[in-house]
Amino acid sequence: MEQILLDFKEQDGINIMIFVEGTILMPKSIFNIYNHKSYVPIGNCLKIIQNWYEQGANIIYCISRKNKQAIDIAKLLKNYGFVGVRLYYRSKNEKYADMVETIQPNVLIEDDCKSIGGAWQMCITHVNPEIKKQIVSLVVPEFKGIDNLPLSIKELKAI
């Protein structure tokens, strides 16, 4: 697992891990689905994530991209003004579950991966059951954003 440090300081609060593509960023058009540089924020995700950070949460991002593309996504997040402490991406033979099991976030937010086959593609699906029990897993419809999630971290953890 590789990581890119982002511009915001680590806090003492909970760790919220957010899968980026399809959950908080989407392509401007269907013709740009594989051009991650053309992705734009979905709905009010910037304000919602900022709110969680201001309540003391550490915002951690994970992505499907690898190597140089991860740097591009980190730049994109910074350019749009996303707050966060780290961006994680998989190494060559690593699976999403490996990242989740290593980081063990308090909350994991990801989309349903509908366009690429559904639940079997999600980060939480193959996580060890003992670890999975400790994570609040929130799944949102792909490309619909996180606008329906609570602004309060306390409420977010209680879902």
Image (tube, rainbow, N blue to C red):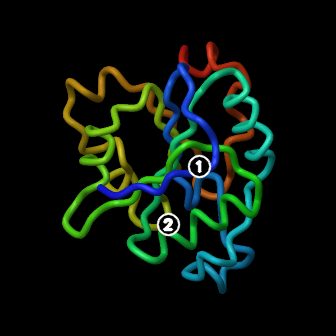
- Is label 2 in a helix, a strand or a loop? helix
Closer to us: 10 or 124? 10
Residue type, label 1: Pro
Q: Residue at x 51, y 22 (%)?
A: 14
The tag on residue 115 is 2
Query: Residue 4: horizontal and vertical position, in percent?
Result: 47, 57
| Precedes in sequence: disc 1 or disc 2 | 2
Residue shown at 55% from the left, 43% from the top: 85
Closer to us: 95 or 74: 74
Q: Mark 2, residues whose alpha carbon is within 10 Å: few (<14), some, or many (≥20)?
A: few
Number of numbered callouts drawn: 2
Residue drawn at (48%, 68%), measured in percent from left and top? 70
Q: In the rendered view, does 13 fall on the left or right side of 55? A: left
Tell me whether the residue at label 1 lies in contact with that at label 2, contact meaning CB atoms closer than 8 angstroms: no
* Secondary-structure class at tag 1: loop
Q: Considering the image in quadrants, where does the N terminus appear?
A: bottom left
The quadrant in which residue 157 appears is: top right
Residue 36, x across and y down, in percent: 59, 75
| Residue marked by disc 1 | 141
**Quadrant into which the C terminus falls:** top right
Q: Nearer the viewer, residue 41 or 82?
A: 82
Q: What amino acid type is highlighted by mark number 2?
A: Ser
In the image, taking residue 37 as reference, residue 10 lies left or right, namely left
Local packing at callout 1 (Cα closer than 10 Å; few below 14, some 14-19, many 20+) is: some
Considering depth in this image, is 39 or 59 the residue closer to the camera? Answer: 59
Residue 152 horizontal/vertical position (percent) = 70, 19
User: How far, Cα to Cα, is label 1 from label 2?
Assistant: 10 Å
Q: Quadrant of residue 125?
A: top left
